[in-house]
Image (cartoon, rainbow, N blue to C red):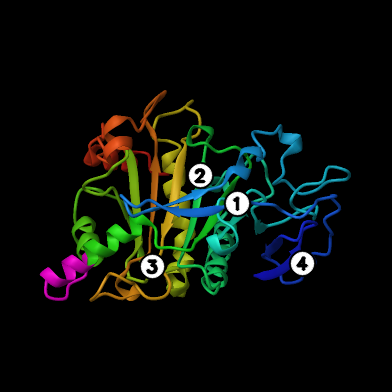
Amino acid sequence: MKKTSTRLADGRELIYYDVRDDAVREAADRRPLGPVSTTSQVRRDPLLGDSVAIASHRQGRTYHPPADECPLCPSAGDRLSEIPDSSYDVVVFENRFPSLAGDAGRCEVVCFTSDHDASFADLTPGQAALVLEAWTDRTAELAHLPSVKQVFCFENRGAEIGVTLGHPHGQIYAYPFVTPRTDLMLRSLAAFKESSGGGNLFDDVVARESAGERVVLEGEHWVAFVPYAAHWPYEVHLYPKRRVPDLLALDEAARTEFPRIYLELLRRFDRIFGEGEPPTPYIAAWHQAPFGSLDGHEGINRDDFALHLELFTIRRTSGKLKFLAGSESGMSVFINDVPPEAAAQRLREVASS
């Protein structure tokens, strides 16, 4: 992998990740852009104890442009995009309309391929491996920023999810706080360690699920299963079999196997609802241990945390979406219409031949 860092016309960082070591990236951003102006701030909810990002400047972000005006495609002639070069393998750049900025964190865009009409599932194993390298590299770099406590790599796919750009891409959020979801995991982890006399909750969950009927896919170094209490109609958790706290700690064997396992999961997701159905909308989310001290979680450290990816769709059946209504949105109590065992069975049925 070759990494080339440059700057866009408004000063934002852009990084090319190339498979070829001899790739040359010298194209300049020719757009007449002024400096990025953001209004991002983080406010703390005194009742719930969580944080909310207020980012009014995002109202003006690019919204469903036609394909020939896609800002994530390579620049071509007089059609200038966020990527100055005429081609790329994987590229990462600072979001022009970030939810988090400055002392409030950082937001980046990850373009998986220059092919506008592709999806992550269409990537070759080599391309998927390069994306994994980019995620890992950005996690390492962002973790060194003084304000960053947690790095979150994720992909929103599909208009139903709320995606405003159709080009295959994901994002990376570098939060200045530990997210509420991670905080809940840490609390459960600490409680289990105390009650079990030193056991690890992640290890216990993976061991139990790996031996059960909800396993979807298993390799030598990874296992994917539908969790016992799945929140979403089709939800899969993917874990490396050797517990590690973050992407940086994956060994070479796990990195080598990951593309095959992950691409198969994504391709199965597109087959859940049968032939002729539109691509399945999904969210793919990496959970990594926070960086720095785990304040408020005595008795555990970041090595107790287990890196894992959660992949889920909001489509519950053909032509119908799972909406977060009163119980989910108002009280955070999920109601799942699809039994996890049935979801796992369906995901095994649609395996690649």
Q: Nearer the viewer, residue 22 or 187?
A: 187
Q: Which residue is mark 4?
A: 23
Among numbered discs 1 and 4, the one appearing first in the sequence: 4
Residue plotted at (71% across, 35% down): 67
Q: Residue furthest front?
A: 46
Labels 4 and 2: the sequence-earlier one:
4
Whichever of callouts 1 and 2 sits on the residue coming sooner in the sequence is 1
Sequence-wise first label, 3 or 4? 4
Q: From the viewer's perspective, is the residue at label 3 or at label 2 nearer?
A: 3
The residue that disc 3 covers is 289
- Which residue lies under the disc numbered 1? 98
- Residue 334 is at least partly visible in this image: yes
Q: Are marks 4 and 2 in contact (CB under 8 Å)?
A: no
Check disc 2 and report its element: helix, strand or loop.
strand
Which kind of residue does numbered mark 4 sit on? Answer: Ala
Mark 2 or mark 3, which is nearer the start of the sequence? 2
Q: List the single residue furthest toward the top.
A: 319
| Label 1 packing within 10 angstroms: few (<14), some (14-19), many (20+) | many
Query: Is 234 within the magenta?
Result: no
Closest to the observer, 307 or 38: 38
State how far apart marks 3 and 2 are (Cα).
Answer: 21 Å
> Over which residues does the magenta segment extend?
190-201
